[in-house]
Image (spheres, helix red, strand yellow):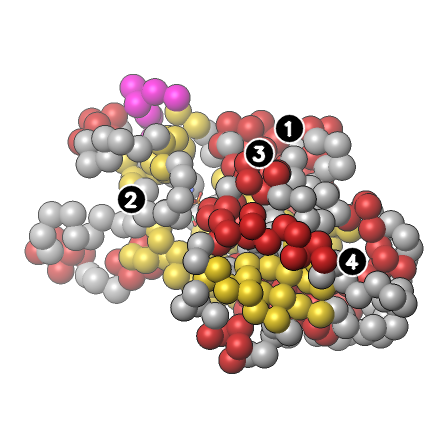
Amino acid sequence: MVVQNIHPKSILPKGIHPMIVTLGSHSALQILKGAKDEGFGTIAICKKGNDKPYRQFKVADEIILVDEYKDIMKLEKELNQKNAILIPHASYIQYVGIENLEKLKVPYFGCKAILVWESDRNKERIWLTRAGCRFPKMFSRPEQIDRPVIVKFHGAGGGKGYFLAKNEKDFKEKIKLHPERTFVIQEYILGVHMYAHYFHSPLTNETEIMGFDKRYESNVDGIGRISARDQMVLPEGKVDPSYVIVGNIPVVVRESFLPRFIEMGENVVKESKKIVKKGLFGPFCLECVLTPEEEIYVFEISARIVAGTNPYIDGSPYTWLRYDEPMSTGRRIAREIKLAIAQKRLADVLD
Ligand code: AMP
């Protein structure tokens, strides 16, 4: 199956001009730019006051302003009249919510059913372990803690408030600061973080590596700049790490890890077909820690485009190898839609 070298606009059927629409946030710049590069019209739905980047970088043919991202629910008719295809990213889950997304009757690129598996930490663990991934040990009760753990909270707010605990006593002290929140206790894996970006095409049935990144998290990535001596004199609580993501840094993985990364992606897709009808397709990310023993732990999956692909608007080293033309994940999505239209298989990539 030839995915490259299809000229923009050349295969969009006459009379039908689908528009690519997304919320103006997260990875919208590359999604919209990629769609334009593939010949689609583009719409950005922006929260009032957040629309400047989408105007300044000229990625949107049209901008719809809303008070809240949730207001996308009121745009159903308008979007359908415009023949729009919705491209999801993390802001949909965070600000619109899975239940609303399920109700929204606008063609959606991806598999909605998989979102439940991604967002429920227990389901996610079952899926990943069945796919053969090495998942950090989970502790259902604090009394079981027998190694360093990371305590993660559910819901919006990213890594805000996450904390490390070395034992039960430490955990009980620290959890007092978060009386309201529900959490999971997970083994803390010491190594380096590596976020592997994939794209699975239901048209070619191939799982492509799109790139890798590491995250820039505040303040955990700044603490190392303060010597242990200076940390000691800071007031209580000031040097507790938090994991709030503020940016992404491109990484190229050691080449000998690639066969394992490819296999992991393929296995996760294979397993997803057993848990939901169409299975996982489109972009996804395995969030990993690589240890000095060269083990790859997967502590989370994102079943959609991740912001870690944003440094690669012009393509990553891996997409350059494969495509010989700039191929961001956003553009790859648009290309998949274009191919699906050409092959009359649009139903295979939309939900
Ligand atoms: P998450 O919300 O699961 O993406 O986690 C936020 C951040 O916490 C990650 O980007 C990592 O820096 C860190 N982290 C999460 N889980 C683990 C783990 N099991 N071991 C080590 N670091 C972790």
In percent of the image, x 40 and y 39: which residue is there? 155
Q: In the rendering, which numbered label is found on residue 161? A: 2
187 falls in the magenta region? no
Q: Is mark 3 within 8 Å of ligand 1?
A: no
Q: In the rendering, which numbered label is found on residue 130? A: 1
| 3 or 4: tag closer to the N-terminus | 3
In percent of the image, x 64 and y 28: which residue is there? 130
Which stretch is magenta?
Answer: 140-147
Q: Position of residue 101 (x, y in %)?
A: 59, 42
Q: Are marks 4 and 2 in contact (CB under 8 Å)?
A: no
Q: Main secondary structure of the magenta part?
A: loop
Q: Is residue 7 left or right of residue 188?
A: right
| 4 or 2: tag closer to the N-terminus | 2
Quadrant where the N terminus sits is bottom right
Of residue 311 and residue 71, the one placed in the foreground of this image is 71
> Could you give the CA–CA distance between mark 4 and mark 2, rounded to whole angstroms?
39 Å
Q: Is mark 1 within 8 Å of ligand 1?
A: no
Q: Is residue 206 left or right of residue 135?
A: right
